[in-house]
Amino acid sequence: MLTGKRGMLFDLDGTLIDSMWMWKAIDIEYLGRYGIELPDGLQRHIEGMSFSETAVYFKENFQIPDSLEVIKNTWNQMAYDKYKNEVPLKKGVLDFLKYCKKQGLKTAICTSNSRELASVCLESLGIDQYIDLLVTACDVNKGKPSPDIYLTAARKLALHPEECLVFEDIVKGLQAGISAGMDTCAVEDKYSEETEAEKRKHARYYVRSFEEIVTGKFERIV
């Protein structure tokens, strides 16, 4: 899997950390403040959107009276303690990051989440020392499935797209990696288990945990 690769580009939520469980609860609480019930399928619809794009979507579709900055700040406040104290690393992540460091592989987090939440999470979990670059979808023109975030990370790491391997847990993220001209590895996550078949269509590799990469027990799809 790693042959010829110099850069490991990771999504964060659902890929490196087990955090997707909390966002539905936050959306229910947030919309509930305005007397709005959570629409069916909302999470799937906003997958891949940047924090800013999601704020625009909420403001326009739910007529939220607050400014975009207030909306984003509110979400940051609601999620901050969970990202600092409750969100765990997924199995095998730390060992794989240490392996990447030892092998001289460059690493980047490419997340649709906010920089504030991503930063506090990486620091709290003690993996910030293994990450060379943090790029959020708010730093680029369009969120996933646009390739912008992955192309930006490769450029900043001085890598060609074909030298990069993208790790993602959702279809739109995998599509972003493919559009960027990179190989993709789908990561199993309970939140996206119903889309596993579709994820496999957009991935060259599939792993149930990062332990499988180091041990060579990963699944090659194409």
Image: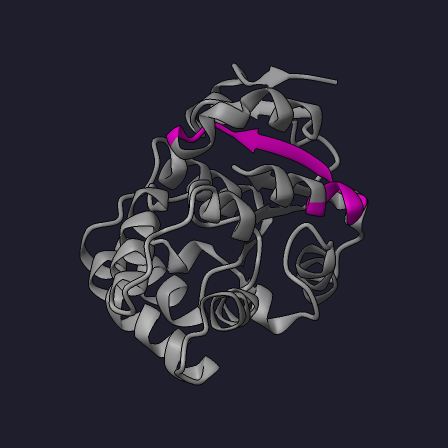
The answer to which quarter of the image holds residue 78 is bottom left
x 52%, y 37%: residue:
169
Q: Residue furthest front?
A: 35
Q: How is the image coloured?
A: one colour
Tell whether 181 sits left or right of 96: right
User: In the rendered structure, does residue 181 fall within the stretch colored magenta?
Assistant: yes
Residue 178 vs residue 6, the one in the foreground: 178
Where residue 91 sits in the image (x, y, percent)? Answer: 34, 31
x 42%, y 41%: residue:
14
The answer to which quarter of the image holds residue 85 is bottom left
Where residue 189 sits in the image (x, y, percent)? Answer: 42, 31
Residue 90 vs residue 100, the one in the foreground: 90
Quadrant for the N terminus in the image? top right
User: In the rendered structure, does residue 152 fall within the stretch colored magenta?
Assistant: no
Residue 65 vs residue 47, the one in the foreground: 65
Q: Is residue 33 above or below residue 176?
A: below
Where residue 53 sits in the image (x, y, percent)? Answer: 57, 67
Tell whether 162 sits left or right of 136: right
Please count the marks in the image: 0
Q: Is residue 211 above or below residue 59?
A: above
Q: Which residues are magenta?
A: 176-190
Where residue 222 sits in the image (x, y, percent)? Answer: 75, 18
- Can I make out residue 102 in this image? yes
x 41%, y 75%: residue:
64
Tell whether 32 sits left or right of 38: left
- Can I make out residue 126 in this image? no
Q: Is residue 182 above or below residue 35?
A: above
x 29%, y 64%: residue:
30
